[in-house]
Image (cartoon, grey):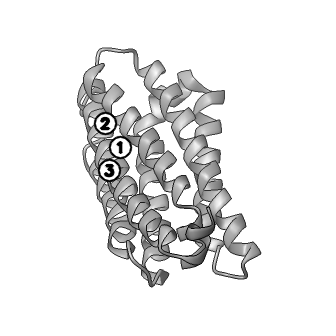
């Protein structure tokens, strides 16, 4: 899986940039309607899921481990589609949906990180642990209010995005030092 991740370091840049943008919007525009936040989350979850699927397909083509990344991608896409299809209902169950998504994808990312044996492993594990902790906080205190929830989502996405960007640049450095990077 390491060679696939190194070659596709850019996918982690996209995941990181999307997460940071989402986090900044959530932190600095908390007065926006929760419905808008649900739609922004839907777009983010779908994009993140697609990028995780891209990584899993490339890993599968290389004969490397891909199951956790593929499942993470499918879960992200389904969560995003559910949020987009029923935004009014999603506002009511948004906290539970985000909590389940964070815990499940965090667990899968943690499992992928444990199975990963290259540079950046710690950031992959950190992203998984952060997702699990965030989901657990939402389960413990579900009725904290839309503004505070927005801030939690923003803080989570910002830190997660930074972790993905750090991982991406570590992978990019490995790519540039690889034979494929010298050919590019």
Q: Considering the image in quadrants, where does the C terminus appear?
A: bottom right
- In front of the other: 56 or 132: 56
Residue position for label 1: 157
Residue position for label 3: 162
User: In the image, is 121 to the left or to the right of 108?
Assistant: left
- Picture residue at 48% right of the left edge, 83% below the top: 115
x and y percentages locating residue 33 in the rendered image: 40, 15
Q: CA distance from mark 3 to mark 1?
A: 8 Å
x and y percentages locating residue 105 in the rendered image: 49, 59
> Badge 3: few (under 14), some or many (20 or more) residues near its Cα, within 10 Å?
many
- Picture residue at 42% right of the left edge, 67% below the top: 173
Residue position for label 2: 154
- In front of the other: 176 or 27: 176
User: In the image, is 87 to the left or to the right of 19?
Assistant: right
| Viewer-nearest of discs 3 and 1 | 3
Element at label 3: helix
Q: Are marks 2 and 3 in contact (CB under 8 Å)?
A: no
x and y percentages locating residue 118 in the rendered image: 43, 81
Q: Are marks 2 and 1 in contact (CB under 8 Å)?
A: yes
Q: How many marks?
A: 3
Q: Please, which residue is most extreme toward the front here?
A: 183
- In front of the other: 89 or 35: 35
User: In the image, is 168 to the left or to the right of 78?
Assistant: left
> Badge 2: few (under 14), some or many (20 or more) residues near its Cα, within 10 Å?
many
- In front of the other: 91 or 158: 158
Q: CA distance from mark 2 to mark 1?
A: 5 Å
| Viewer-nearest of discs 2 and 3 | 3
- Picture residue at 66% right of the left edge, 58% below the top: 53
Element at label 1: helix
């Amino acid at each position: 899986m390491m060679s696939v991740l190194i070659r596709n370091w850019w996918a982690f840049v996209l995941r990181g940039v999307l997460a940071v943008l989402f986090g900044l919007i959530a932190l600095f525009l908390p007065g926006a309607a929760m419905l808008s936040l649900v739609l922004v989350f839907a777009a983010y979850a779908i994009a993140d899921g697609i990028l995780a699927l891209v990584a899993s397909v490339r890993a599968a083509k290389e004969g490397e481990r891909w199951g956790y990344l593929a499942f993470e991608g499918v879960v992200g896409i389904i969560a995003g589609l559910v949020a987009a299809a029923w935004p009014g209902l999603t506002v009511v169950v948004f906290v539970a949906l985000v909590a389940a998504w964070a815990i499940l994808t965090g667990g899968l990312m943690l499992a992928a990180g444990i199975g990963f044996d290259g540079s950046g492993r710690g950031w992959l594990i950190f992203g998984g642990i952060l997702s699990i902790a965030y989901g657990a906080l939402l389960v413990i205190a579900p009725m904290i209010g839309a503004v505070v929830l927005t801030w939690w989502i923003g803080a989570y996405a910002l830190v997660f995005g930074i972790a993905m960007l750090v991982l991406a640049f570590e992978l990019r450095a490995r790519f540039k030092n690889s034979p494929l990077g010298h050919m590019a």
